[in-house]
Every structure is written in structure tokens, then in C-alpha cells.
Image: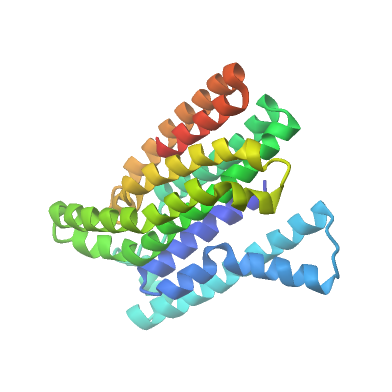
Amino acid sequence: CLMLPMLVFTKINSAVIRALGKTLSSVFYDYQFAFMLTGLSLAVTLGRNEIQYLVFVFLIALCVMQVCAFLQMGAILYKKDNGFSDAINSNKSNVFNYDYMVSTTVSYLNQWSVVLLSGLLLSSTAAGVATVAQKSAAILSFVITIYSIVYSPSFAVLGAKGGRAVVEKGKRITKEMTVVAAPCVLFYFLFGDVLLSFFDADLASESFGVLLIFVVAHFLNISFGLVGAALNMTGREKKVKNIAIIGVGIGLAVIYFLGSIYGLYGYVAGYAFSMVF
């Protein structure tokens, strides 16, 4: 319960800092700092790996991130607007967005709900197969993450010039992302079983088909471009919120329906559908 709002505000802080022109810092705040602190903590305690301890350390790391992010935002706004309080009270520097917060919260709830559904619908072995395959295919999601971090601020600038400029920029970025992702997809098809063997040699053959389903879903997601980022950065956060709420509801229903009937592959097909939808 405590971690969810921390994760949401971490995402919001990262977006705000990126919008203020500090792209590199936004990447730093986008969970990497928390993972670094967690890893450092584990190293200091020489392998202490109780789940309660790990969750506690990660929560503390997220709290530290909030403090660092607010301090940096305050410093940036002070320099830009000759005073932090003036910037917060001015119309041109609204650093809180309710719709963006809701859509981000829904996104995290969806991720956790999918995990809960895997435990409800699948055996422990099948759930392990799905998790290994999904995490292996998630490397492709870095393509969208990187391009979103780099190009999201430009959507805000182009949005002031008109929607057509945003559309043209989005088309160029989508083509570039597709070209970048295509060799990765080919790698998965040729050597995916080898990659899976590093995680669990016994489950590699069983996970390969599941992996390819996730790879295709990620590639389709990439081919649709940075639609969410473009909408969020051009004042259409409410549309993103509504789409996220409807999409999560439909996605979870499809996962439950297909998983109940077809087991592992039904669950994975439903999960892939929810990713693309």
C-alpha cells in the first residue's frame, strides 16, 4: 500500500524533471536510483535476502528519491522563475497533474493484477514459465522507454505549433523505433531458447513459444509508436487516463477469460493482448 503511491510519484517526478529540460536526471530518478540503493544495501549486509527486508529497503530508496527529486525541481524552478513559490503559484508552472497520476496508478495496478491472475489461473510451474518469458522479452520495452525519454519533451514543443507537427514527428520516431527493434526480434526468434536457458535450462523449451508471443506483442506495441507520450505531452492527459482505465478493465477480463479456458497459452495470449491494447 505504501509502495504504490511512491512508485506513482517517482514516475511523475521523472516526467516533470524531464519536461524541465533535465533528461539525464529524469533517467536517474526513473527507479535506477532505488535499485542501486537496494543492491548496495544487499552488498553491505552480505547477502541478507529476507523478502520483508528487501521490500523495506526498496521503500526507503523510493522515499530518498522523492526528496532528491523535489530538491532538484525546486532548484530548477528557482533558477527559471526567480523563486520556487512564485513558480508553483504561476499558471505556467503547474507541476501536478491529476489525470497523469491516475493513469500511472492504473498502469501499476494492472501490472500487479496480472501477476495475481497468474497465481490464480496457473500452476506454479506455468506461472514460472510465463514470468521468465515475459521478463526475457521485456528487453524490447527498453526501445520505447529510451525513445520516450529522449523525444517526449519535443512533443510538448511541437504541440504548441499544432497537431500536424506532432503527428509527423511521431511517424518518423515510429519508423526509427521499428527499424531498431527488428534485429532484436530476429535475435529472439533465432536464439531465444539459448537466452532462456540462462534463466532455467529445464523450462527453456517450454518457455520458447511463450517468449515469442511476448516478443510479437512488444514489437506491435513499438510499431504503434509513442502515442501515450505524445498525448501526455500535448495536454491530453485526460484521454490517456480514460484509455488506461478502459484498457485495463478489458485487458484483465480477456486474460481471465482466456486463461480460464486455455491455461498457460490462453493467459499469455490475453496478457499480450492487454499489452498491445
Residue at 81% x, 53% y is 52
Report the front residue among 208 and 158: 208
What residue occupies the far top of the structure in this picture?
A: 261
Residue 219 location (% of width, % of height): 40, 46
Report the front residue among 29 and 194: 194
Image mark count: 0
Residue at 68% x, 27% y is 122
Look at the image and tell me in which quarter the C terminus lies: top left
Left or right: 49, with 168 as reference point: right
Which picture quadrant has residue 91? bottom left
Residue 81 location (% of width, % of height): 33, 78
Residue at 37% x, 61% y is 147
Q: How is the image coloured?
A: rainbow
Residue 247 location (% of width, % of height): 42, 33
Q: In the figure, 196 relative to 246: above or below?
A: below
Residue 44 location (% of width, % of height): 82, 74
Left or right: 220, with 130 as reference point: left
Residue at 47% x, 53% y is 187
Q: In the figure, 87 relative to 116: above or below?
A: below
Q: Is residue 159 visible?
A: yes
Q: Is residue 2 visible?
A: no
Which picture quadrant has residue 218? top left
Report the front residue among 209 and 88: 209
Left or right: 255, with 207 as reference point: left
Report the front residue among 29 and 172: 172
